[in-house]
Image (cartoon, helix red, strand yellow):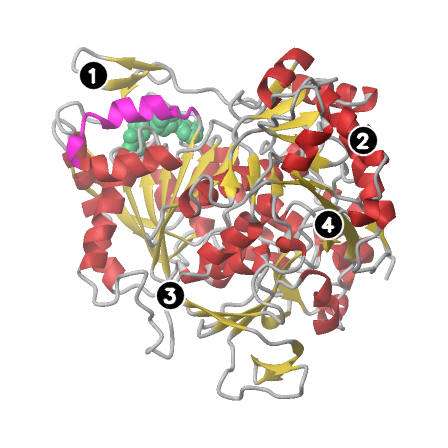
Amino acid sequence: MKKSSLNDQYKKPQPSSSQSSSSSSAANGLTQASLRRANVNWDEQGQPKSEEFDDFYFNTDSGIDESRYVYINSSRLQQRWKAHNGSFTVLETGFGTGLNFILTWLEWMSFQDSQPLSNASQPASNKDQQVSNHLHFISIEKHPLDKDQIAQALALFPQLKHLTDQLITEYPLLIKGFHSLQFKDQHITLTLIFDNVNAALPQLNGPIDAWYLDGFAPAKNPDMWTDTLYSSMARLSRAGSSIATSTSVSDVRRGLSSSGFELNKVPGFGLKREMMHGTFIQGQGPMANPLDHIKPWLKPPTKDIRHIAIIGAGIAGCTTAYALARRGIKVTIIDQHGIATEASGNPQGAMYAKLAAGEATHSDIYVQGYLQSLRWLHQHLEPGDGWDNCGLIQLASTEKETKRQQKFIANTHYPKQLLHSLSREEASKISGLTMNSGGLFFPEAGWVSPLRLCQQLVKHPLIQLQTRSISELVDVNGDWQLKSTDGTTEPENTFSHVIIACANQSQKLLPNCYLPTKSIRGQLTYLDEDECDSQQGNKKKINLKTVLCGKGYIAPADNGKYCLGASYNIKDDETQLRASDQQKNFDYLEDFGEEFQHLHRKLNESDPALLPGRTGFRCTTPDYLPMAGPLLDEIAFDTDFTAIRKNLARYPRQEAQFHSGLYLNIGHGSRGLTSAPLCAELIAAYICEENFPLAKDHTEALLPGRFFIREMVRNKR
Ligand code: SAM
């Protein structure tokens, strides 16, 4: 495997197109590489057995009792949850059938039921100090079972069906990397990482409170039980973290003890003679500087969470509010115009992942984001009410695009359910039109009304909305008061955290931060469906069944209206509709097959100025990835980390300074539907001190301060 250089992320020249990226992740294994599905054999009783490891996934007499005995009870979860503030994280090596997860979830539900303020819909606002009451279960799996195999295995436990069904609904496609799964109205997150344990652990930031070392016994699977595993465990644990495993072999005992775990050998389950559980004693193992593993600029200091404000009620702001509220945190969203009025106000946004061969970081992040968004859409919107997963074809309408798509398909290993190539004939059949080209088909993609999604998300009882225009953030002893444009502040409203999610307006609120975002004007044209049909005369009527993306995009008509767009104008702040841009949008119709080409000719005979439409402004970044994360204090960083100008790898192992409790979630360009839910979960993870929902390298690729750091590394400042 190619070695990654720490400098890659920062040293590459600025990309010049949306296909470009700066990345080190192609080298770290978290790429578009292939993943091998588990080979499962089923015995006569229907018990699953791994062919790779020649062993059963769980005890064939009583999988449930074994899991409870070895992992849940010996980790003393109920007792520890009672004494725990904030998010509690379990990490399991080997997800297998998900049985350990389901049983831990059940245990968590019974714990929550025993708590007075356990319900997500009950505000915890009467307490001054809010705690995030959240279980994060991370499981790493090298050979995942697919949905059907999981369903078959867990069908052995009909008493768990109410949870199993939810897991199966949310269970991801078998794509290498991180998948962060949320379950509606539940204070639980499951992060599934499809990768080898030893490759995935270095991509985590911790802390882990309970380790379930599953993954088959060392005799069957020696490759998993490595020094990397033990040293990663020491790095990611905190004082009192527990470990439970059904093995007690001396190599494992030695590995764990020398990494700082105090261990007890106890009788094993069933016929097994012994197992181990234990506790991490900080300082007992070798002391590494944690900043060797997590760069200081990814580690804002911890801060008590009280009330959180989000400025901007577009898709970035509303998804972030929901990610926090879901964790029991009270959030106020403030926007001068109300919900989803600016770039998020387009009636139909195309939702898919724009991918490029050889650009692993972009593709990995957008695929992960796309899958995350799909799960959110299924949870929050009814099909037909602002959301239609009618599929989307990214058309190969030029020779260049055809070659790009061919290269992409040849070099990646995505499952067909995510995307696949279509011939011209197939594209015609699927789209309902007479197409001139084939393309890449995303069968689960479609269009979304960002407004409907935002409206649904802000219904959460812990989310409040305020309509006012903020002009300044006032630092009051490390907390924030928000000054309105009319000069007033609400002194009783001091926020521990503020998330700035107001796209192009953010620069005004953060005059001292380096935010190299660009505003790009986009104009949409609305076409009346009946009118379009009548223009067809005796030609075949337009019966568009999927979203089409060429140079522009068009979606199936909603409420009798097609949405065609969008123009792309840099350095242009004209808010009024422009006839010349309507004309440009008409030209996009050329990519969309014979019926739309005919319509194009007809529209060219009419006056484009008479057609309705809408203007919005995208907020883009130089590398076409969002800026999502904490805000570095760049002035202090410039001094404290000046050494990175000579060698980034020799960055000082000291804390970086941040603007206390300030976060940014902007720069989603025209892909907010794909990137916003994932970035929302990322920001909630930073604030609640959870493991990131993305690989550490990908988190770094989204860090708002990356442009500042890049300029320092290139000695440009
Ligand atoms: N916890 C599971 C459950 O509740 O069904 C059972 C896990 S099964 C005993 C062990 C799992 O570890 C298998 O699914 C196997 O593919 C996975 N595994 C083995 N070696 C691994 C490695 N190096 N990295 C990640 N997963 C691994």
Residue extent of the magenta highlight: 143-159
Estimate the spatial distance between the alpha carbons at disc 3 and disc 4, rounded to whole Å.
37 Å
Q: In the rendered image, which residue does mark 4 sit on?
A: 612
Q: Circle 3 sits in a helix, a strand or a loop, which is it? A: loop
* The C terminus sits in image quarter: bottom right
Estimate the spatial distance between the alpha carbons at disc 3 and disc 2, rounded to whole Å.
50 Å
Nearer the observer, 580 or 283: 580
Classify the position of ligand 1 by quadrant: top left, top right, bottom left or bottom right: top left
Mark yes or no: residue 25 visible: no
Instruction: Say whether disc 1 or disc 4 marks the residue closer to the N-terminus.
Output: 1
Judge whether 124 appears above or below 118 on screen: below
Instruction: Say whether disc 2 or disc 4 marks the residue closer to the N-terminus.
Output: 2
Front: mark 3 or 2: 2
Nearer the observer, 467 or 36: 467
Ligand 1: does it lie within 8 Å of the C-beta at label 4?
no
Front: mark 3 or 4: 4
Three-letter code for the amino acid on which mark 1 is drawn = Gly
Q: In the rendered image, which residue does mark 1 sit on?
A: 46
Estimate the spatial distance between the alpha carbons at disc 1 and disc 4, rounded to whole Å.
61 Å
Mark yes or no: residue 615 visible: yes
Magenta includes 140? no
